[in-house]
Amino acid sequence: MKGEGKPTINDVAAAANVSKKTVSRVINKSPLLSDKTRAKVEAVIKDLGFVPNLQARALALRRNFIIAAIHDNPNAQFLVNVQQGILEGIEGSEFGLMVQPFDRNTEDFEQEVRAFLERQRPYGVVLLPPISSDEAIVDLCREMGTRYVRMSSIKNDDEAHIVSSNDRDAVREATAYLIEKGHTRIGLIEGPEGFTSPQERRAGFEEAMTAAGLSLDPALVRPGSYTFESGVTAAQDLIALDRRPTAIFACNDEMAIGAMITCRRSGMLIPEDISIVGFDDTPLSSHVWPSLTTVRWPIVEMARTAAQKLIEPDDVAAQMPWMLPSSLVERGSVVPPK
Amino acid sequence: MKGEGKPTINDVAAAANVSKKTVSRVINKSPLLSDKTRAKVEAVIKDLGFVPNLQARALALRRNFIIAAIHDNPNAQFLVNVQQGILEGIEGSEFGLMVQPFDRNTEDFEQEVRAFLERQRPYGVVLLPPISSDEAIVDLCREMGTRYVRMSSIKNDDEAHIVSSNDRDAVREATAYLIEKGHTRIGLIEGPEGFTSPQERRAGFEEAMTAAGLSLDPALVRPGSYTFESGVTAAQDLIALDRRPTAIFACNDEMAIGAMITCRRSGMLIPEDISIVGFDDTPLSSHVWPSLTTVRWPIVEMARTAAQKLIEPDDVAAQMPWMLPSSLVERGSVVPPK
DNA sequence: CAATTAATTGACACCGGTGCCATTCAAGGT
DNA sequence: ACCTTGAATGGCACCGGTGTCAATTAATTG
């Protein structure tokens, strides 16, 4: 083991006077190995500063030590939180995190994903919403034998490869909180159609209203698209009503802040004249004035769990929780109605 | 090439009736190959859907097809922009993007970086600020023979491994813009000490003031730490002065918005009573009211350039630009003073 | 104590490519 | 026509690990 380069398994084997296979067993924590040999080899490994070459292992094992986060243009804060969570999940392991966005609007979107998976052969992939609800991609993972976990808001099939948040419960709780404060005319700004998460949020809202014996006035339910502008538009509609709502629940923070600014611009005081609740707990929500009461998605926890499920064996992964709780973050944008 | 698994170079070689080495030459675009053979092999590759195994190549070439972004807790938007840039830079290549944050405050920070580099052996790393100014990490890369590019705001030595933005020019331009509008008493909210980028920004500010024959009133220069709160504090100081500034230049958007909110809360109108300019062009800056005039860092371009420099040969990389222009984004927070 | 059986360890091919050098073959020089 | 030279390919070891199965050694049993 003279030379310049990093020591290899052969150097270790020679120095410890054992076969390379035995060294391999040590670094793989194989149980069929005498404690004496293990100790001897470990000492040599430490002494030489040996680090197993992941590329060689990847070749032999046919799987790379990489977890890939596959996404389609989610917002920055979300993406960063997911990355943080995944990194927490793989911390202490040998895995690395690879990030790969795709544009679902291109013709050969599926081909691109396939090409990526074939090239980098990640050990597992975390599918971020909204891509996580694309069944074609899930099929692709299955077909290629790539482990995957979907981040989503509901468990839409019986498979184990999913982590979710209980948006519905959280929104029910948030709405109940408004009702408890005394609000009865509550506006709802919805999310974009065709996705499960806005549906769940709306369902939670309805459940809370129904449970409290309140009727659902269709005039108080406005469409939205998760954008600031759509929050503005929806809020303009709501405050133009004869009987304005005394509170608004917006299905995400951006719309909530759009609504907040719109209300204020038309002379209303927040929260005195109208209470507002958002969803997501973006950094924005604590920077606005008054700070926004909102629901916090357990994004980091979900991502961490997803990553852990990927690197654990199937039987262990199946034991792990798949639904993590969202929680209400009380700030300054809610008071009882006048 | 019956079987289940993906076709390998051997399958291609057999089907094309050439040696695997020849196939290797084709996929490496080697020039010493007859066009006829190349065409034949390429047809077979396409026919079989052969994708070279990057892990095997990584082993043989001793370098992984991965570009790693190494950072220490930068903000979310910045991080995402960098990722986007790097991904643009490696688009069309076989490279993947790996993201790895480190905590510079831990004892064995350097060891962690080393362990990461030894394990994953990325082909190249992009060092994000503020980690990019850590010479120990740069030395580590050099020692390990890992290619690297530093994202930073000035070129502090004669090496080629750097991409920057010309903060100084941009701030000079932005300040000149304020002066041109008629402002003469301009407040400056600085960035944290000990980093090069705030120094450059301040220098640009001073250059513009000097060039316009304006003196630099020390009372108008307030410290800041790039946080919302520090912007609030600095603005409180500035508007408490007997002769208030008619404009404020904040070294980043967060502080600018902190200043904006502080001014408004003490009854001033923006921009009528005071003009404000920020730096960074965060999404926030177009969401506040009035929208913030700011300087846009060429983050995406810098990251793209950095990635391209990594995957190109040295002589090509040396030809690429290393300083990209920041630019002033005119919005609604600046008008001439009353 | 010999015969089994279980626990350790080693030999060797193989994962799928690339580097180095030998070989083949057509073209150019004399 | 013979020798030289260069272009186009092939052969084979090697990158640094792992899987399979055989070999060796230790422990157990009748």
Image (spheres, coloured by chain):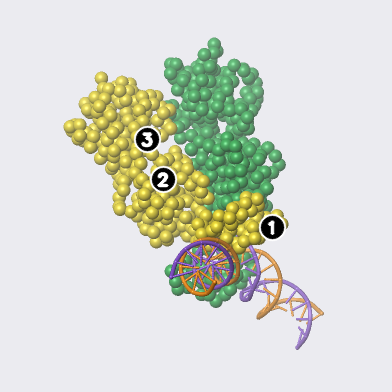
Chain colours: A yellow, B green, C orange, D purple
State the image quarter where residue B208 is shown: top right
User: Of the residues shown, which amino acid type is indicated by label 1?
Assistant: Met
Is tag 1's residue or tag 2's residue first in the polypeptide sequence? 1
Q: Are marks 1 and 2 in contact (CB under 8 Å)?
A: no
What is the x, y in percent for residue B114? 61, 46
Is tag 3's residue or tag 2's residue first in the polypeptide sequence? 3
The image quadrant where one finds the C terminus of chain A is top left
Q: Chain of mark 3?
A: A
* Tag shown at residue A304: none
Judge from the rendering whether residue A134 lies leftward or rightward of residue D9; answer left or right: left
Residue that badge 2 annotates: A305
Residue located 34% across and 39% down the image? A325
User: Of the residues shown, which amino acid type is indicated by label 2?
Assistant: Thr
Residue that badge 1 annotates: A1
Mark 1 and mark 2 on one chain: yes
- Cα separation, mark 1 vs mark 2, equals 41 Å
- Cα separation, mark 1 vs mark 3, equals 54 Å
What is the x, y in percent for residue B162? 64, 43
Q: Nearer the viewer, residue A240 or A28?
A: A28
Judge from the rendering whether residue A103 lies leftward or rightward of residue B54; answer left or right: left
Residue that badge 3 annotates: A296
Question: Is residue A107 something one can see in this rendering?
Answer: no
Judge the density around disc 1: few (<14), some (14-19), many (≥20) Cα neighbours within 10 Å: few
